[in-house]
Image: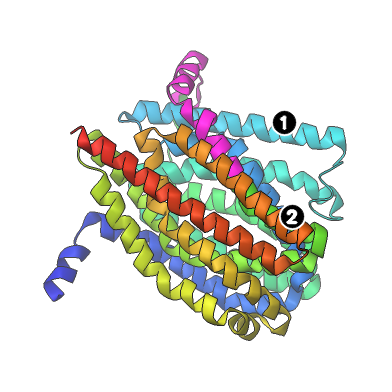
């Protein structure tokens, strides 16, 4: 066993995952440490409004650069990757500017509902979109160049800043607007910190834009805006819809319960899921480009994720309400009831991470888009049945989670089948 562990620890892939995961773990520990204080300062209503604002950003984020940043890892040549960086940044500027124009023209009509009575704070949305697109570009470049340690350190610093400011400003102004402003500013600070830490040297020729080259690059990777961006948009919409509907039908407190569940249950996904995904993406690309078998790597990664997720998600199913009340305060006991059901869906999303990673490598993003469309329809229908027909928020969340888990299982099976077809041709 000792020799086995020593052998595994020496593998570059495992070391890379550990580096990313350690930074994420430190950041999540900070969040856990501050959460009992922060949830007692603001309360469910404030977190509900923040959750709806964050959900809106999540829906808009795939539109920021049309998911082109996720293609930066794929090219063999560095010059082509640089062109993708330019394209991504240019699109981020254009889309965020367009969002600002739309918000100004309609004077937040239809959008004010999403963020309650935050007024002028709605104008933070385009700014956060720009930050998000820029952040994705820097992160993907670091992943391409295997500089995972930089990303891990920057994430820790960002979490420390966010939690400290939430506590300090919350003592003076414990309202939802404080949380929204901090969330928006922290995104920009995270982007700037990561850029400085990466020590990216920008040359004059790097700033120049050759539109013919950019158009050619866009056409080569057109499956990202055609398939990946709509898929990411649908996925974000399906994840955000429960928060929006609960806020509209049951009030901001219910949205706050669901929002805190997303935060807590998302920790294992960020700690291990994103770490594995960020390291696995370039690894799978390398295996694919070298005409080696992909399925064994994806299958092992999926089983590994499945074993890791049993304990944390299973614990929430068993004693979710008691844990939430103990950690966050008695006001959050009911959030544990949501968490019991939501943890089932989160578990399947957790083990699905390797399957999602391999999709663009296999060039099956069209199939993923079709899956996402069907999945969204199914989850939205059952959620509305629970909330509007059965008039029970717990049943609505339960139906949403169970149907989503079934759909994720089908996705994993489909991806493994596509990997098998690819490997059989070698």
Which label was assigned to residue 356?
none
The answer to whether marks 2 and 1 mark residues whose Cβ atoms lie closer than 8 Å is: no
Q: Residue furthest left?
A: 3
Which residue in the protein does label 1 denote?
A: 98
Alpha carbon separation for disc pair 2 and 1:
23 Å
Relative horizontal placement of residue 5, taking residue 85 as reference (left or right):
left
Q: Quadrant of the N terminus?
A: bottom left
Relative horizontal placement of residue 310, taking residue 253 as reference (left or right):
left
Question: Looking at the image, which is closer to me, 308 or 108?
Answer: 308
Dot 2 surroundings within 10 Å: few (below 14), some, or many (20 or more)?
many
In the image, the segment drawn in magenta is 205-234
Relative horizontal placement of residue 415, taking residue 50 as reference (left or right):
left
Q: Is 206 within the magenta?
A: yes
Question: Looking at the image, which is closer to me, 169 or 252?
Answer: 252
Dot 1 surroundings within 10 Å: few (below 14), some, or many (20 or more)?
few
Residue at 49%, 13% in the rendered image: 212
For label 1, the SS is helix
x and y, in percent, of residue 366 in the image:
47, 32
Most common SS among magenta residues:
helix
Q: Quadrant of residue 51?
A: bottom right
Which label was assigned to residue 244?
2
Residue at 53%, 45% in the rendered image: 135
Question: How many dots with numbers?
Answer: 2
Question: Looking at the image, which is closer to me, 36 or 354?
Answer: 354
x and y, in percent, of residue 306 in the image:
37, 64
x and y, in percent, of residue 69 in the image:
48, 37
Q: Is 195 within the magenta?
A: no
């Amino acid at each position: 066993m000792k020799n086995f562990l020593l052998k595994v620890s020496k593998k570059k892939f495992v070391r890379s995952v550990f580096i990313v995961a350690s930074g994420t773990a430190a950041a999540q520990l900070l969040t856990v440490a501050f959460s009992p204080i922060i949830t007692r300062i603001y309360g469910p209503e404030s977190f509900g409004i923040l959750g709806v604002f964050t959900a809106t950003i999540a829906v808009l984020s795939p539109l920021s650069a049309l998911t082109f940043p996720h293609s930066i890892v794929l090219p063999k040549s560095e010059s082509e990757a640089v062109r993708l960086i330019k394209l991504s940044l240019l699109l981020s500027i254009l889309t965020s500017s367009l969002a600002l124009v739309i918000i100004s023209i309609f004077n937040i009509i239809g959008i004010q509902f999403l963020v309650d009575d935050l007024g002028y704070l709605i104008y933070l949305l385009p700014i956060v979109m720009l930050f998000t697109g820029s952040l994705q570009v820097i992160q993907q470049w670091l992943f391409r160049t295997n500089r995972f340690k930089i990303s891990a350190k920057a994430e820790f610093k960002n979490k420390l800043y966010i939690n400290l400011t939430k506590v300090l400003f919350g003592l003076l102004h414990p309202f939802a607007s404080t949380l929204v402003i901090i969330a928006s500013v922290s995104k920009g600070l995270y982007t700037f910190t990561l850029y400085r830490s990466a020590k990216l040297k920008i040359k004059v020729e790097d700033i120049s834009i050759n539109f013919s080259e950019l158009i050619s690059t866009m056409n080569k990777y057109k499956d990202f805006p055609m398939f990946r961006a709509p898929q990411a948009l649908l996925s974000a919409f399906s994840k955000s819809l429960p928060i929006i509907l609960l806020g509209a039908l049951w009030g901001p407190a219910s949205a706050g319960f669901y929002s805190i569940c997303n935060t807590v249950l998302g920790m294992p996904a960020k700690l291990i899921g994103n770490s594995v995904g960020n390291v696995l993406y370039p690894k799978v690309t390398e295996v694919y480009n070298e005409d080696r078998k992909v399925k064994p790597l994806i299958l092992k990664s999926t089983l590994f994720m499945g074993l890791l997720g049993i304990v944390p998600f299973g614990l929430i199913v068993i004693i979710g309400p008691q844990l939430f009340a103990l950690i966050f305060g008695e006001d959050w006991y009911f959030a544990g009831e949501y968490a019991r059901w939501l943890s089932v869906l989160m578990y399947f999303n957790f083990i699905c991470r390797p399957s999602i990673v391999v999709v663009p490598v296999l060039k099956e993003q069209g199939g993923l888009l079709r899956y996402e469309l069907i999945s969204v329809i199914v989850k939205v229908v059952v959620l509305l049945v629970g909330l509007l027909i059965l008039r029970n928020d717990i049943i609505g969340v339960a139906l949403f989670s169970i149907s989503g888990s079934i759909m994720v299982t089908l996705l994993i099976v489909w991806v493994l089948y596509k990997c098998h077809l690819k490997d059989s041709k070698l």
